[in-house]
Image (tube, rainbow, N blue to C red):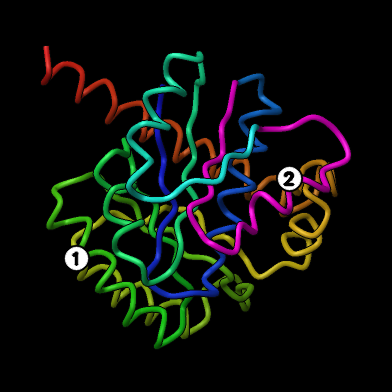
Amino acid sequence: MKTISVISRKGGTGKTTISMQLAIHHYLAGKVVMLADTDPQLSSIESLKIRPTEGPQGVASTGPKIFTLQTNARRAGVDLLVIDTPPGREDDILPAISLSDLAVMVVRPTFLDLKAGALTARMIVQLQRPGLILLNQTPACLDGAEQLQVQNALEALALLGLPIAPVYVRARVEYQDALATGVSVAELAPGGAAAAELATVADHIDKLATQLSRKSLRSFG
């Protein structure tokens, strides 16, 4: 079983959207998926409740309970555990990072997000856990080039000591519409740009988490 945590010290970065999309994407691919929501607002759980068809199992939890939840999920045959973490609460974020095969740090290309991202990245590095930066809600390219806002963000993020996902999640209305209806962007708009983009992001995260999980098992052995 792989465990992926979606984290940020700042609210509004899109953690819940990314968590939901990753969980549903892999569920539709035939995996047994559990989505653990450790945010007191339980936005992921609420979104899954309005899903029109079967989907990932949603479980409300907290940081101190994540270890037990992970153990039970593994025994139950879950293939992928996605942890949606709350902003700012280290008691819930730190355990999620510690137990993850990969911690995905979601950040938008804004000054406040980048400032909070530096603190989030520091947590991952200090815990010596694998991390990945996912740039979210990025504006569209102009004339085939990233806008200055994105270029500046990438330069700042490159200093944090974590790899950056090669595909960025664009600011698209499909993501908000999908969250509001408990579905994936692929279900909402099959063949659309958001669906293709999310599939590439999800596959990159899954491959990286798989590599890291196997490396960890070899080290343990």
Tag 1: amino acid:
Arg
The quarter of the picture where the N terminus appears is top left
Mark 1 surroundings: few (<14), some (14-19) or many (≥20) residues within 10 A: some
Q: Earlier in the sequence, mark 1 or mark 2?
A: 2
Q: Residue at x 25, y 64 (%)?
A: 121
In the image, what residue occupies the spot 45% across and 56% down?
85
Q: CA distance from mark 1 to mark 2?
A: 32 Å
Front one among 147 and 121: 121
> What is the span of residues highlighted in magenta in the rendered image?
32-56
Residue located 11% across and 11% down the image: 221
* Figure check: 166 above or below 27: below
The answer to which of 139 and 31 lies nearer the viewer is 31
Quarter location, residue 75 = top left
| Magenta highlight on residue 37 | yes
Total number of numbered discs in the rendering: 2
Of the pair 39 and 171, the residue shown nearer to us = 39
On the image, the x and y values in percent for residue 130 come to: 24, 44
Question: x, y percentage for residue 162?
Answer: 24, 57
Query: Residue 4's image quarter?
Result: top left
Read off the residue under disc 1.
122
Q: Amino acid at mark 2?
A: Leu
Secondary structure found at label 2: helix
Dot 2, how many residues are within 10 Å of its Cα: few (below 14), some (14-19), or many (20+)? many
Residue under pointer 2: 48
Side of 198 where 146 appears, left or right = left
* Residue 170 on image: x %, y %: 62, 65
Q: Please provide percent x and percent y for residue 198.
A: 62, 47
Q: Residue at x 29, y 26 (%)?
A: 213
Is label 1 in a helix, a strand or a loop? helix
| On screen, residue 173 above or below 210 | below
- 34 vs 84: above or below: above
Q: Nearer the viewer, mark 1 or mark 2?
A: 2
